[in-house]
Amino acid sequence: MITKAQQKYIKALQIKKYRKLHQAFLVEGEKSLVELLTDTRWPVETLYCTELFYEKYATLIQQRAASYILTTADDLAKAGTLTNNQAGLAVVPWFVWPDLGNPTQGRWLILDDIQDPGNLGTILRIADWYGLQGIVCSIGTVDVYNPKVVMASMGALLRMPVYYTDLQEFIAQQSLPIYAAMLEGKNVHQFNFSPQGGLLLMGNEGHGVQPELLQYVQHSLHIPRYGLSESLNVAIATAVLCDNWLRDFGG
């Protein structure tokens, strides 16, 4: 069972300042938990799980979880963020990725103040799907350990390096080509990306790319519209651009 003290701690980790204080976050649901337990880079501080989940994955749980506590689906719903959780939730310490430095190769996403957790989680899945090297976020971008981001990423969070930094300072130091999604620019379907890789800059859902970052953009790209919709969701736009990016190189 989950005690009141444990429930209070789990509730605290649903708030950004307490995630930062404790340097920990939550992973919930069967699929995400199995991804977590099979990725040995990520330690598992405590796993709260149902008997059914434990019976299915007992060996993995015993190998990977520092501690585990059997509980009920009702207790999981009361403590966590999911209204229906038949599997469990885990408390996971933050993972420190290797130092970002200044990338000199590969394909990277740059996110400028993405606010919606669902968008960031989906973008993580897209970056993982297309084999990008990592994601660099502005300080104002939603916290990658937000429970809604973790859930929407469907395990991609565990594989995709994510960094937060001052974007203007970071971009100003880059030697790789910098592309940006813009309402006006070159038709991405008719554009050839550099074979050396680069940085793809995606702007805020409502305001696009910050004006102070535009001076560093070498290639503005747009996705041509054939219907009547006014705009594309930023995660969908990221997927379209990444697909064209990789297609240039037989991806």
Image (spheres, rainbow, N blue to C red):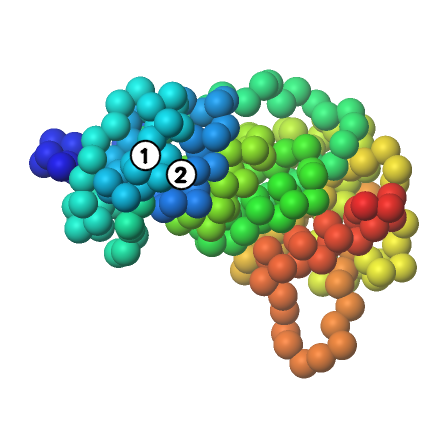
Where is residue 83 shown, x and y percent of the image?
Answer: 26, 56
Eyeballing the image, is 5 above or below 141?
above
**Residue 203 percent location from the top left of the image:** 61, 51
- The quadrant in which residue 61 appears is top left
Q: Which residue is nearer to you in this view: 44 or 216?
A: 44
Q: Residue at coordinates 47% horizontally, 37% vertically from top-left? A: 35
Residue type at mark 2: give it.
Leu
Task: Tell me if residue 162 comes above or below residue 31 in the rendering.
Answer: above
* Vertical side of 88 occupied by 191: above or below: below
The residue that appears at 71% across and 79% down in the rendered structure is 227
Please give the residue where the numbered disc 2 appears in the rendered image.
33
Q: Is residue 139 left or right of residue 214?
A: left
Judged from the image, the secondary structure of the residue bearing numbered disc 1 is: strand
Amino acid carrying mark 1 in the image = Ala
* Horizontal side, residue 164 vs residue 195: left or right: left
Q: Dot 2: what SS?
A: helix
- Residue 150 badge: none
Residue beneath disc 1: 90
Residue nearest the viewer, comparing 158 with 221: 158
